Amino acid sequence: MKKVKLIYNSGAGQSKFTYFLDTVIEKFMNNDIEVSIYRAGEKENLEEFVKNSDSENIYGIIVAGGDGTINRVVNIMMKYNIKTPLGIIPAGTSNDFAKHINMPYNFSECLDKILKNNVKPVDVGKANDKYFINVCSAGLFTNSSQKADKNLKKAVGKLSYFITGAKELFKFRPFSVNIETDDEMFFEKINLFLIFNGSSVGGMTYFTSDSSIHDGLLDLVIIKNCSFHELGGLVAKVMSGHTLEDKNIIYKKTKTIKITKVKGKCDRPDVDGDEGPEFPLDVCCIENGINMFL
Ligand SMILES: [Mg+2]
């Protein structure tokens, strides 16, 4: 009998996934797959559970949680070079990656999709020693999910990120960076940068609509230092799905990006909604880094 390893985040979002556990077990067992379950919490040894998963006998590693939980599992899979496919059930506060790969929000449909066994390799981003599946970012608004109060997160879900972000706006000052991509080097005073593996972030699906997790490239988006007034216009433009053509936006595709902070204050970069590595950042795209049920 084959096995799946299921990791679920009991505290994730306003998720009802825990009520669904029995159905999950039933569905897999009906397909002759045994389920071994890991309840991810604060104190744990997730690495122990995930690390020995590269066996013919294991159908997949399934994560029911948000971007943060997926990120942790992907980091372990990359560390141990695990090629067993990863399946995502969108059960977190923020499910940007699941949205990007079109996993159904209905848990049952999602499992049906995983059971079709359509496995493809996808790219993984790497920032210094931390892997990311969605985005690595720093600057204005970018680490709201890290900073958002836990209780606020539980009560209002993703809205808590916007509340936290809005509070930050009034204190924020631009910072200067040196940036080196595959083909150029430049200095810029910026509000924020986002490095996408190929996805939507914060629900802004159109933001980089032509980015892909299969192209071996990262999408770098920089919002330059600009007036408060211009910034408002930019955010509105981005949220409404307009193009990234603007004098205050730098947008390019590249395989590698080096970012060195030169002047000014900026919080530690964020990877997939969690605390990332310190500057200077050395970021690259690992083409076909992991296998996934798509
Ligand atoms: Mg890409």
Image (spheres, grey):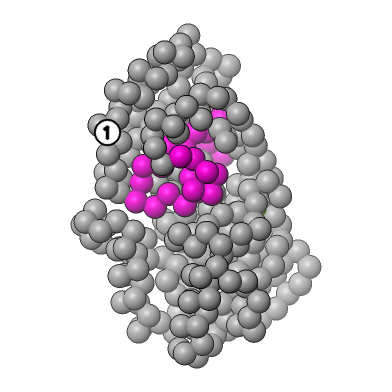
Total marks in image: 1
Name the residue rendered at 42%, 19% in the picture.
28
Which residue is outermost to the top? Answer: 1
For mark 1, does the 10 Å Cα neighbourhood hold few (<14), some (14 to 19), or many (20 or more) residues? some
Which range is magenta? 76-104
- Mark 1: which amino acid? Thr
Q: Is mark 1 within 8 Å of ligand 1?
A: no
Q: On the image, which quarter does residue 208 sit in?
A: bottom right
In magenta segment, residue 99: yes
Say above or below: 6 vs 234.
Answer: above
Q: On the image, which quarter does residue 78 sit in?
A: top right
Q: Quadrant of the C terminus?
A: top right
Q: What residue is shown with label 1?
A: 18
Left or right of residue 150, residue 267 in this image: right
Say above or below: 192 vs 195.
Answer: below
Left or right of residue 17, residue 63 in this image: right
Name the residue rendered at 56%, 65% in the picture.
207
Name the spot of residue 237 as percent of width and height, x first.
53, 76
In magenta segment, residue 98: yes
Of residues 45 and 7, the one drawn nearer to the viewer in this rendering = 7
Of residues 138 and 204, the one drawn nearer to the viewer in this rendering = 204
Say above or below: 253 vs 139.
Answer: above
Q: On the image, which quarter does residue 280 sit in?
A: bottom right
Name the spot of residue 282 as percent of width and height, x first.
62, 61
- Element type at mark 1: helix
Which residue is outermost to the right? Answer: 183
Can residue 177 be seen in the rendering of this structure?
no
Name the residue rendered at 21%, 56% in the picture.
155
Name the residue rendered at 36%, 72% in the picture.
165
Can residue 292 be seen in the rendering of this structure?
yes
